[in-house]
Image (spheres, rainbow, N blue to C red):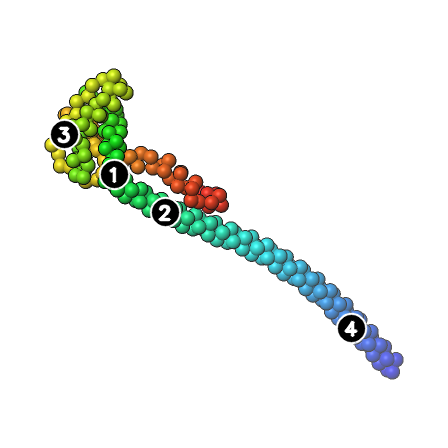
Protein backbone atom coordinates (compact mmCIF):
# COMPACT_ATOMS: atom_id res chain seq x y z
CA UNK A 1 0.00 0.00 0.00
CA UNK A 2 2.86 2.18 0.90
CA UNK A 3 4.51 1.69 -2.50
CA UNK A 4 1.28 2.46 -4.27
CA UNK A 5 0.95 5.66 -2.28
CA UNK A 6 4.47 6.61 -2.98
CA UNK A 7 3.90 6.01 -6.70
CA UNK A 8 0.79 8.16 -6.66
CA UNK A 9 2.56 10.96 -4.89
CA UNK A 10 5.44 10.74 -7.34
CA UNK A 11 3.00 10.89 -10.26
CA UNK A 12 1.22 13.84 -8.75
CA UNK A 13 4.55 15.50 -8.08
CA UNK A 14 5.61 14.85 -11.68
CA UNK A 15 2.36 16.26 -13.01
CA UNK A 16 2.70 19.32 -10.82
CA UNK A 17 6.28 19.76 -12.00
CA UNK A 18 5.23 19.45 -15.63
CA UNK A 19 2.33 21.80 -15.01
CA UNK A 20 4.61 24.38 -13.44
CA UNK A 21 7.06 24.01 -16.29
CA UNK A 22 4.26 24.45 -18.85
CA UNK A 23 2.94 27.37 -16.87
CA UNK A 24 6.36 28.95 -16.82
CA UNK A 25 6.72 28.28 -20.55
CA UNK A 26 3.36 29.90 -21.27
CA UNK A 27 4.29 32.86 -19.08
CA UNK A 28 7.63 33.27 -20.85
CA UNK A 29 5.95 33.09 -24.25
CA UNK A 30 3.36 35.56 -23.09
CA UNK A 31 6.10 37.86 -21.83
CA UNK A 32 7.91 37.58 -25.18
CA UNK A 33 4.69 38.30 -27.04
CA UNK A 34 4.00 41.24 -24.75
CA UNK A 35 7.52 42.55 -25.32
CA UNK A 36 7.08 42.17 -29.09
CA UNK A 37 3.73 43.94 -28.89
CA UNK A 38 5.27 46.75 -26.85
CA UNK A 39 8.14 47.04 -29.29
CA UNK A 40 5.74 47.14 -32.25
CA UNK A 41 3.54 49.64 -30.46
CA UNK A 42 6.52 51.89 -29.69
CA UNK A 43 7.66 51.72 -33.30
CA UNK A 44 4.16 52.36 -34.50
CA UNK A 45 3.81 55.31 -32.15
CA UNK A 46 7.16 56.75 -33.29
CA UNK A 47 6.15 56.29 -36.91
CA UNK A 48 2.88 58.07 -36.29
CA UNK A 49 4.70 60.87 -34.48
CA UNK A 50 7.17 61.27 -37.34
CA UNK A 51 4.32 61.36 -39.85
CA UNK A 52 2.51 63.92 -37.70
CA UNK A 53 5.67 66.03 -37.37
CA UNK A 54 6.22 66.02 -41.14
CA UNK A 55 2.58 66.89 -41.77
CA UNK A 56 2.65 69.67 -39.17
CA UNK A 57 5.88 71.07 -40.64
CA UNK A 58 4.41 70.96 -44.15
CA UNK A 59 1.22 72.69 -42.99
CA UNK A 60 3.24 75.28 -41.06
CA UNK A 61 5.32 76.03 -44.16
CA UNK A 62 2.16 76.33 -46.26
CA UNK A 63 0.61 78.72 -43.72
CA UNK A 64 3.85 80.71 -43.55
CA UNK A 65 3.96 80.95 -47.35
CA UNK A 66 0.32 82.02 -47.48
CA UNK A 67 0.80 84.70 -44.83
CA UNK A 68 3.97 85.95 -46.56
CA UNK A 69 2.15 86.16 -49.90
CA UNK A 70 -0.77 88.00 -48.31
CA UNK A 71 1.57 90.46 -46.59
CA UNK A 72 3.47 91.10 -49.82
CA UNK A 73 0.19 91.61 -51.69
CA UNK A 74 -1.05 94.05 -49.03
CA UNK A 75 2.24 95.97 -49.18
CA UNK A 76 1.88 96.21 -52.95
CA UNK A 77 -1.74 97.37 -52.66
CA UNK A 78 -0.85 100.06 -50.14
CA UNK A 79 2.09 101.22 -52.21
CA UNK A 80 -0.08 101.42 -55.33
CA UNK A 81 -2.71 103.43 -53.44
CA UNK A 82 0.00 105.76 -52.15
CA UNK A 83 1.51 106.14 -55.60
CA UNK A 84 -1.86 106.92 -57.18
CA UNK A 85 -2.60 109.46 -54.44
CA UNK A 86 0.75 111.17 -55.04
CA UNK A 87 0.26 111.16 -58.82
CA UNK A 88 -3.27 112.57 -58.57
CA UNK A 89 -2.02 115.27 -56.21
CA UNK A 90 0.74 116.25 -58.65
CA UNK A 91 -1.65 116.27 -61.61
CA UNK A 92 -4.12 118.45 -59.70
CA UNK A 93 -1.31 120.88 -58.94
CA UNK A 94 -0.33 120.81 -62.63
CA UNK A 95 -3.89 121.74 -63.60
CA UNK A 96 -3.78 124.66 -61.18
CA UNK A 97 -0.47 125.75 -62.68
CA UNK A 98 -2.02 125.69 -66.14
CA UNK A 99 -4.96 127.72 -64.90
CA UNK A 100 -2.59 130.28 -63.38
CA UNK A 101 -1.02 130.71 -66.84
CA UNK A 102 -4.21 132.35 -68.12
CA UNK A 103 -3.07 135.54 -66.38
CA UNK A 104 0.30 135.48 -68.13
CA UNK A 105 0.78 137.85 -71.06
CA UNK A 106 2.20 135.01 -73.16
CA UNK A 107 -0.83 132.77 -72.67
CA UNK A 108 -2.17 133.78 -76.09
CA UNK A 109 0.74 131.87 -77.63
CA UNK A 110 -0.45 128.76 -75.78
CA UNK A 111 -3.98 129.25 -77.13
CA UNK A 112 -2.65 129.63 -80.67
CA UNK A 113 -0.83 126.31 -80.35
CA UNK A 114 -3.86 124.52 -78.84
CA UNK A 115 -6.31 125.83 -81.47
CA UNK A 116 -3.90 124.96 -84.28
CA UNK A 117 -3.43 121.44 -82.89
CA UNK A 118 -7.19 121.00 -82.67
CA UNK A 119 -7.63 122.27 -86.24
CA UNK A 120 -5.05 119.77 -87.48
CA UNK A 121 -6.78 116.98 -85.56
CA UNK A 122 -10.22 117.98 -86.82
CA UNK A 123 -8.96 118.26 -90.43
CA UNK A 124 -11.88 120.32 -91.70
CA UNK A 125 -12.14 123.44 -93.90
CA UNK A 126 -14.44 125.14 -91.40
CA UNK A 127 -14.49 124.86 -87.62
CA UNK A 128 -16.26 126.40 -84.68
CA UNK A 129 -14.41 127.32 -81.48
CA UNK A 130 -15.45 127.17 -77.87
CA UNK A 131 -13.40 127.98 -74.76
CA UNK A 132 -13.79 128.65 -71.06
CA UNK A 133 -15.25 131.95 -69.88
CA UNK A 134 -11.81 133.19 -68.80
CA UNK A 135 -10.17 132.32 -72.12
CA UNK A 136 -12.83 133.58 -74.52
CA UNK A 137 -11.88 137.27 -74.17
CA UNK A 138 -8.27 136.37 -75.06
CA UNK A 139 -9.24 134.78 -78.39
CA UNK A 140 -9.61 137.93 -80.49
CA UNK A 141 -9.50 138.46 -84.26
CA UNK A 142 -5.71 138.83 -84.26
CA UNK A 143 -5.27 135.52 -82.44
CA UNK A 144 -7.55 133.73 -84.91
CA UNK A 145 -5.60 135.27 -87.79
CA UNK A 146 -2.39 133.93 -86.25
CA UNK A 147 -3.97 130.48 -86.01
CA UNK A 148 -5.01 130.57 -89.68
CA UNK A 149 -1.49 131.63 -90.72
CA UNK A 150 0.09 128.84 -88.67
CA UNK A 151 -2.37 126.26 -90.01
CA UNK A 152 -1.63 127.37 -93.58
CA UNK A 153 2.14 127.19 -92.96
CA UNK A 154 1.77 123.60 -91.73
CA UNK A 155 -0.76 122.29 -94.28
CA UNK A 156 -0.85 124.68 -97.24
CA UNK A 157 -4.63 124.92 -96.74
CA UNK A 158 -7.00 127.62 -95.53
CA UNK A 159 -9.34 127.16 -92.58
CA UNK A 160 -12.36 129.21 -91.52
CA UNK A 161 -12.76 129.72 -87.76
CA UNK A 162 -15.92 131.04 -86.11
CA UNK A 163 -17.39 130.98 -82.63
CA UNK A 164 -19.93 128.38 -81.61
CA UNK A 165 -23.16 129.58 -80.12
CA UNK A 166 -22.88 127.25 -77.14
CA UNK A 167 -22.17 128.37 -73.53
CA UNK A 168 -18.50 128.61 -72.48
CA UNK A 169 -16.70 125.43 -71.45
CA UNK A 170 -16.65 124.53 -67.77
CA UNK A 171 -12.90 123.89 -67.65
CA UNK A 172 -9.75 125.35 -69.17
CA UNK A 173 -8.86 124.77 -72.82
CA UNK A 174 -10.57 124.84 -76.18
CA UNK A 175 -12.82 122.58 -78.27
CA UNK A 176 -13.16 122.74 -82.06
CA UNK A 177 -16.14 121.20 -83.83
CA UNK A 178 -17.21 120.88 -87.43
CA UNK A 179 -19.99 123.21 -88.55
CA UNK A 180 -22.55 120.39 -88.45
CA UNK A 181 -21.41 119.53 -84.91
CA UNK A 182 -20.79 115.87 -85.72
CA UNK A 183 -17.05 115.84 -85.11
CA UNK A 184 -15.16 117.53 -82.33
CA UNK A 185 -11.56 117.80 -81.19
CA UNK A 186 -11.23 118.37 -77.46
CA UNK A 187 -8.07 120.22 -76.46
CA UNK A 188 -8.97 121.09 -72.89
CA UNK A 189 -6.32 120.79 -70.17
CA UNK A 190 -7.95 117.74 -68.55
CA UNK A 191 -8.20 115.97 -71.91
CA UNK A 192 -4.63 116.87 -72.88
CA UNK A 193 -3.35 115.49 -69.58
CA UNK A 194 -5.47 112.37 -70.02
CA UNK A 195 -3.85 111.72 -73.41
CA UNK A 196 -0.43 111.98 -71.81
CA UNK A 197 -1.45 110.27 -68.58
CA UNK A 198 0.69 107.15 -69.05
CA UNK A 199 3.77 109.20 -69.90
CA UNK A 200 3.12 111.58 -67.00
CA UNK A 201 2.76 108.62 -64.63
CA UNK A 202 6.05 107.19 -65.87
CA UNK A 203 7.92 110.47 -65.40
CA UNK A 204 6.52 110.96 -61.90
CA UNK A 205 7.28 107.35 -61.02
CA UNK A 206 10.89 107.62 -62.17
CA UNK A 207 11.39 110.95 -60.39
CA UNK A 208 9.82 110.11 -57.03
CA UNK A 209 10.11 106.40 -56.33
CA UNK A 210 13.24 104.41 -55.46
CA UNK A 211 14.48 101.29 -57.24
CA UNK A 212 13.22 99.11 -54.34
CA UNK A 213 9.77 100.66 -54.62
CA UNK A 214 9.75 100.19 -58.40
CA UNK A 215 10.50 96.47 -57.89
CA UNK A 216 7.25 96.13 -55.94
CA UNK A 217 5.42 96.81 -59.18
Q: Nearer the viewer, mark 3 or mark 2?
A: 3
Dot in front, 3 or 4: 3
Return the disc, 4 or 2, that comes first in the chain's sequence. 4
The answer to whether residue 170 is above or below residue 20 is above
Q: Residue furthest front?
A: 105
Q: How far across and how far down the image is residue 133, in percent? A: 16, 39
Q: Mark 3 highlights which residue?
A: 163
Residue annotated with mark 2: 86
User: Is there any visible trace of residue 59 in the rendered image?
Assistant: no
The answer to which of 139 and 28 lies nearer the viewer is 139
Which mark, by number, is residue 161? Answer: none
For label 4, the residue is: 20
Q: SS of the residue at dot 1? A: loop
Identify the mark nearer the N-term, 3 or 1.
1
Q: Say whether residue 169 is left or right of residue 48.
A: left
| Circle 3 Cα neighbour tier, 10 Å, few/some/many (<14 / 14–19 / ≥20) | some
How far apart are the alpha carbons under marks 2 and 1?
Answer: 28 Å
Q: Say which residue appears at 23% left-offset and 40% top-offset.
A: 103
Pick whichever of labels 3 and 2 is earlier in the sequence: 2
User: Closer to us: mark 4 or mark 1?
Assistant: 1
Residues marked 4 and 1 touching at CB (< 8 Å): no
**Label 4 element class:** helix
Q: Secondary structure at mark 3?
A: strand
The residue located at (25%, 23%) in the rendering is: 150
Left or right placement of residue 51 versus residue 130 in this view: right
Nearer to the camera, 81 or 101: 101
Percent of width and height locating residue 214: 46, 43
Query: Between 12 and 175, which is closer to the camera in this rendering?
Result: 175
Q: To which residue does mark 1 refer?
A: 104
Label 4 – label 1 distance at C-alpha: 124 Å
Mark 3 and mark 4: Cα distance apart in space:
129 Å
Amino acid sequence: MKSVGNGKEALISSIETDARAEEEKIIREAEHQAADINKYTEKNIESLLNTARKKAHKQAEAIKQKITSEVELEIKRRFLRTRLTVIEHIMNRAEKKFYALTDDQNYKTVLIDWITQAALGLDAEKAQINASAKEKPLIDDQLLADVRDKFYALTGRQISLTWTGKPPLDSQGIVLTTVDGRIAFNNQVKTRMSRKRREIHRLIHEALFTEDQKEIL
